[in-house]
Image: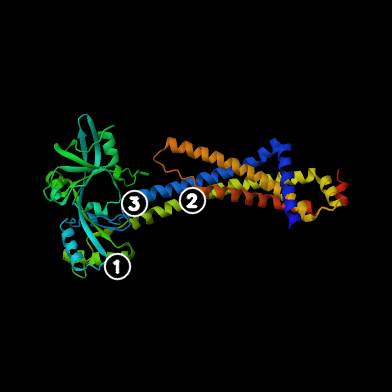
Amino acid sequence: MNRFIHELIESFRIAFAQIRANKLRSILTALGVIIGIVAVTLMGTAILGINTGVERSLAGFGDDLLYIQKWPWKQMDDWSVYRNRRPIRIEYAQRINEWIVEHPEGPLKVAVPAATAGTAVVRGEYRVSGIFTLGTSSDFPVILHSEMVEGRFFSEVEARGGRNLVVIGFDIADALFPNESPVGKIVRIRDQEFTVIGVVSRQGSFLGMFSWDSMMVMPLNAFRRYMSVYGNSEVRVQVDATRMDEARDELRGILRSLRGLRPEQKDDFEINEQLIIREQLDPIKNGIAIAGFFITGLALFVGAIGIMNITYVSVKERTKEIGTRKALGARRRTILLQFLIEAVSICLVGGTTGLLLAWGASAVVAVMAPSFPVVFSMSLVLTGLIVSVLTGVFSGFAPAWQASKLDPVVALRYE
């Protein structure tokens, strides 16, 4: 064991001595590995960033929520079928909550009515347009998957009275109230004055997906008073996430009863959930991953071939040295280990350089595109180093094996 450790240390010493003696050749040899590791690391960073961005955006939908809506979130086969459906009445929320009270052990927890519309918000000379506006009840904080960074939500009394109150997203607050608190201030919505009572914490957006940052919430009765003719109504139901299938079936039965559908009639409503969006995004993410890793794998393969060729050249140049060492009693294992470690060392140097370059590139992306979540984790560093070692073993084994099999007599006579 001590002999093997000594051989290992000596092989690393010889390897780095060769790298220092042939700096330019070593740099050019490692260039393929550097490019491959940069590609692998940046691709891994991009995939982790996409996953983080998608998860962050989907968090706004809630993995324990079911959305009763007129339109499906999946691709529609016949648009006219869904267009002619009856609207979802917000009164369904009260009926569902009554059922929940009667069945406390059921999978449904609470139903919250919601009506949505797009509008503009004005404060003095500041104006933001296309704001997703939600009218809802005081139960909405129960299903809100974001924290309040400032202020509060409206109470049940304020909601029933239809007070002109509004809770706004972080981006709206930043646009309308730069460098000051919006809580207690007045904004105008459809020529009506509303008091800002709260701000939702920054969620961030990704690829144009759902984000609370550019939304606002007001009492449902105030929404009806000023925007009911423009709104689309729905009901959001919080359920036991561990009993999702049971909750979906239970809710479907309640809705069919509320809408008076006969057994032979099809559902004229949709029960949407976060899983539908995931199923649509997963093939896209997988396609990006497969294409990216194919390209990076090709870059690493080219780099490995280059290292293999240079290692063969190194074996030829040092044939007499190999013969001398064998004549003095060096084992085949020692010779094989020497050239294999030399190839691995070049790959490790290239891999470390590639990781540093990838880290620098990730930092630049984080500054230039702050909305894109850059995830440069320790797992990527370890993956890069492991890939570097495996590339060195793959590219260096054949030349090292050839060197270990040389006949010492023939090697000493080599010119």
State the count of labels.
3
**Residue 402 appears in view:** no
Q: Secondary structure at mark 1?
A: helix
Where is residue 223 drawn, in percent x and y? 15, 46
For the residues labelled 3 and 2, the Cα–Cα distance comes to 22 Å
**Pointer 2: residues within 10 angstroms few (<14), some, or many (20+)?**
some
Q: Are marks 2 and 1 in contact (CB under 8 Å)?
A: no
Q: Which residue is mark 1?
A: 246
Q: Is the N terminus in the top left, top right, bottom left or bottom right quadrant?
A: bottom right
Q: Residue type at mark 1?
A: Glu
For the residues labelled 2 and 1, the Cα–Cα distance comes to 34 Å
The earlier-in-sequence mark between 3 and 1 is 3
Where is residue 219 drawn, in percent x and y? 17, 47
Residue 10 vs 252, above or below: the answer is above
Name the residue at the top extreme. Answer: 125
Q: Secondary structure at mark 2?
A: helix
At x 57%, y 48%, the residue is: 384
**Pointer 1: residues within 10 angstroms few (<14), some, or many (20+)?**
some
The earlier-in-sequence mark between 2 and 1 is 1
**Left or right: 346, with 372 as reference point:** right
Q: Which residue is mark 2?
A: 289
**Residue 414 appears in view:** yes
The earlier-in-sequence mark between 3 and 2 is 3
Q: Residue type at mark 3?
A: Ala
At x 17%, y 46%, the residue is: 230
